[in-house]
Amino acid sequence: MSELFEMLGHETRTSVCGHDALPVARTFAPGIVVLDIGLPDMSGYQVAEAMRADAQLRSAFIVALTGWGRRNDAIHARRPGFDAHYVKPVAVARVRQILRDADQRARGDRLACRQAML
C-alpha cells in the first residue's frame, strides 16, 4: 500500500504495530493514515482513538483498510474516529478515491478555519 501511495506521488511512512505508529505519525504529521484493524499489539480502533485524542494528529483522514468486512465492522469503525472503512484487497481506483476524499475534507477544513477567523 505504501508503494502504491508513493507511485501516486505521496510521501509515506510505515509501522507494523500500533505502538510504533503513534510516534511515527507525530513526527511525520500525515494528512492520511491507513490502518489495519487487526494489529499485533493493539487494535486499529485503539490507534485511531489515540490519534483523535492527540491535538497534533486529530485532523488526519484516518482510513481502515482491513480484512474485517461485515457491515457492522464499517459501522463500528466510525466510533473511534475512522473517516472511511475499506476491505482488502483494495483496487487502485479505490485508493484514488481515498485520496480525493481526504483532499476534499482538507479543503473543507481550511475553508471552515477561514470562515471562523472572519
Image (spheres, rainbow, N blue to C red):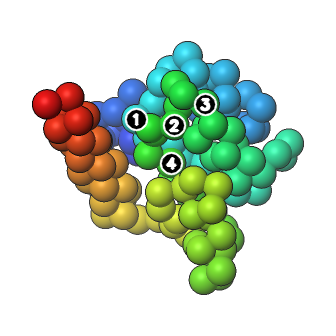
Residue at the disc numbered 1: 31
Q: CA distance from mark 3 to mark 2?
A: 6 Å
For the question of whether residue 112 can be seen, the reply is: yes
The residue under label 2 is 58
Q: Distance from label 1 to label 3 (Cα)?
A: 14 Å
Secondary element at image label 3:
loop
Residue furthest front in the image: 118
Residue at screen point 58% across, 41% down: 52
Q: Which residue is mark 3?
A: 54
Where's the C terminus, which quadrant? Answer: top left
Q: Quadrant of residue 77?
A: bottom right
Q: From the viewer's perspective, is residue 43 above or below residue 29? A: below
Q: Is residue 96 left or right of residue 111?
A: right
Name the N-terminal-most of marks 1 and 2.
Answer: 1
- The circle drawn on residue 3 is none
Between disc 4 and disc 2, the foreground one is 2
Residue 41, percent across and down? 85, 42
Residue 95 quadrant: bottom left
Say which amino acid is labelled 1. Answer: Gly
Whether pointer 3 and pointer 2 mark residues with C-beta atoms closer than 8 Å, the reply is: yes
Query: Hey, which quadrant is residue 15 in on the image?
Result: top right
At a point 51% along the width and 37% down the height, the residue shown is 58
Given residues 5 and 83, the one toward you in this image is 83
First of labels 3, 4 by sequence position: 3
Q: Is residue 3 visible?
A: no
Circle 4 is placed at which residue position?
A: 62
